[in-house]
Image (cartoon, rainbow, N blue to C red):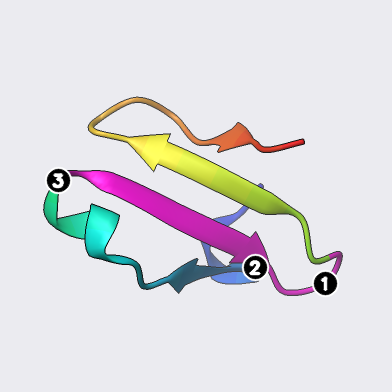
Amino acid sequence: MPLYSMKEIWTPLKWVGIKFFKTLDEGDYFVKVGNNPRKKIG
């Protein structure tokens, strides 16, 4: 999935290195932990 089609969701977990993303077109959620690739949630 291209980077420009995702929006980062701010949470306090970002301070620990866990980031959440939402796709703009379909509304799917992804999580990224550290330097690992994004993984789809659900």
Q: Which residue is mark 3?
A: 16
* SS assignment for the magenta stretch, majority: strand
Q: CA distance from mark 3 to mark 2?
A: 24 Å
Q: CA distance from mark 1 to mark 2?
A: 7 Å
Kind of residue at badge 3:
Val
Toward the right, the furthest residue is: 26
Toward the top, the furthest residue is: 36
| Percent of width and height locating residue 17 | 20, 44
Closer-to-camera residue (38/14):
14
Q: Is residue 15 left or right of residue 2?
A: left
Magenta span of residues:
17-26
Q: Is residue 19 magenta?
A: yes
Rendered position, 2 above or below 38 = below
Q: Which residue is mark 2?
A: 5
Marks 1/2 in contact by CB < 8 Å: the verdict is: yes
> How packed is label 3: few (under 14 Cα within 10 Å), some, or many (20 or more)?
few
Q: CA distance from mark 3 to mark 1?
A: 28 Å
Q: Which residue is mark 1?
A: 25
Kind of residue at badge 2:
Ser
Q: Is residue 7 magenta?
A: no
